[in-house]
Image: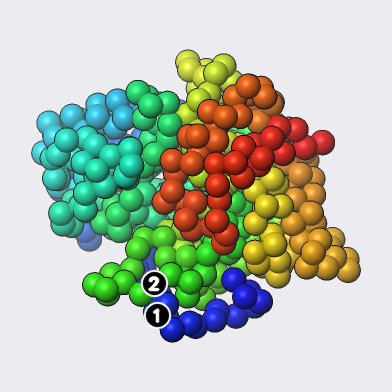
Amino acid sequence: MGCCHHYQFAAGHESVFAVDFSSIKYGPGALEELHFDATELGMTRVALFTDSVVKNLELVDSAIQGLRGAGIEYDIYDEVSIEPTDSSFKEATRFAIDGRFDGFISIGGGSVIDTCKAANLYSTYPAEFLDYVNAPVGEGLPVPGQLTPHIACPTTSGTGSECTGIAVFDFLEKRVKTGIASSKLKPTRAVVDPNTTESLPANVVAASGFDVLCHALESYTAKPYTERKRPANGVRPLSQGANPYSDMGCRQALWLTGKYLVRAVEDASDTEARHGMMLAATLAGIAFGNSGVHIPHGMSYSVAGLVKDYCPEGYPSNHPLVPHGISVVVNAPAAFRFTAASCPWRHLEGAKLLSAEVGGATELEAGEALGQHLQTMMEATGIPNGISEVGYDENDIGQLAQGAFMQQRLLSNAPCEVSEEDLENMYTQAFRYW
Ligand SMILES: NC(=O)c1ccc[n+]([C@@H]2O[C@H](COP(=O)([O-])OP(=O)(O)OC[C@H]3O[C@@H](n4cnc5c(N)ncnc54)[C@H](O)[C@@H]3O)[C@@H](O)[C@H]2O)c1
Ligand SMILES: [Fe+2]
């Protein structure tokens, strides 16, 4: 990454980055205007995706009444699975095909928004399920054209899925998480109302808040776009690496997360902190949707996919699951200690933005300074102390590393080469932190 303060151009390498803007309506009360957005996008018959908890929130109910008042027909699908699977995506698709809708609205966390993206895709361009799924698990075929309009309304301060072209699911047969990635999956509009965060359980704020933190920190430290080969066809990949545009969103999201994450978890009535985390989530979504994440997310896919019997508070108790943000952050201190040598300045800068006291830390100490600060934030918010506390033991390290090594789309966005042995070492470091 060179000195990593500036992007360095090299002959034969990339010198261009692309920005695919998201259309966003953001602020307290934004959901009250949902029917205006639906009308503007020409929706007359809507598939409304939500989950069984979110459906009963007052704010959501009144947004739905607004659609009715505007004469927009809707059918509600509230059977979204939290941490969706290939089979839950397929069920949602059947609903979408049967209903012949001209618009999609998702109101919920990442699980709801991603399910809606998949149902929109497979009902608009029917195909074998694995056709659009990322290689090597699926065929990775391109999405043929524009999807049906989709308005995404997040109710967690986390995934940023409202601004990304990604839909993530658990592939049950292979016990691994994977996804579908295409700029065409990006919702037509995001309607982000931070008032929705006020009913979030503390554990969900913590887990989804660390998802935000890792989106921002991974995008900020990703392989710079200038280290890629220039594409022959003029089309940049969805994950084009760190670039000046994504850096802006990352820096602001890190600063907000450093200021507000612990407060938002500790006190549900701290509106400033809860709303601050929602803004951070959207900004980090814009940033990582443009540059891409890397090792902590790559490692998370097997931590989540191989789950044994972990059932956290604040999440549905009908099946074991490791919430996405937890499955990511348990790897983060080990992963950033590993990547720090490739771009120490950005790791130190990340720690400072997160309000760490780094004093006179040198670039050689960057990984340790950042790792320690992440551990302090994890401990302060009740996050499990490493992968051992979500149910893994030493005998699982090999299988975890094998699963993570399959996530080449993410690993190739890291600022350095990553071997399967490196992944085993990182899982060993991630076993217990304090
Ligand atoms: N598409 C992307 O770009 C992207 C990025 C990161 C993560 N993800 C995926 O998103 C999923 C995780 O989403 P998430 O972290 O937003 O959580 P979630 O959607 O899984 O919801 C977590 C829990 O919070 C509840 N909940 C949601 N909003 C609430 C509210 N306002 N008040 C009270 N309870 C509420 C839900 O009912 C659920 O029990 C994972 O599958 C993950 O892989 C997708
Ligand atoms: Fe994530």
In the picture of the structure, the residue carrying the numbered disc 2 is 229
Amino acid type, callout 2? Lys
Mark 1: secondary structure? loop
Q: How far from the left and from the top, in percent, is residue 354?
A: 72, 59
Q: Is residue 102 above or below residue 276?
A: above
* Residue at 49% over, 41% down: 405
Q: How far from the left and from the top, in percent, is residue 410?
A: 46, 51
Instruction: Decide if residue 387 is in sight here.
Output: yes
* Residue at 41% over, 77% down: 14
Dot 2 and dot 1 residues touching (CB under 8 Å): yes
Between discs 2 and 1, the one toward the N terminus: 1
Q: How far from the left and from the top, in percent, is residue 292?
A: 46, 58
Residue 2 location, quadrant: bottom right
Amino acid type, callout 1? Gly
Residue 20 location, quadrant: bottom left
Looking at the image, which is closer to me, 58 or 237? 237
* Residue at 36% over, 75% down: 230
119 horizontally vs 330: left or right: left
| Residues at marks 2 and 1, CA–CA distance in whole angstroms | 7 Å
Residue 421 location, quadrant: top right
Looking at the image, which is closer to me, 57 or 310? 310
Looking at the image, which is closer to me, 317 or 241? 241
In the picture of the structure, the residue carrying the numbered disc 1 is 12
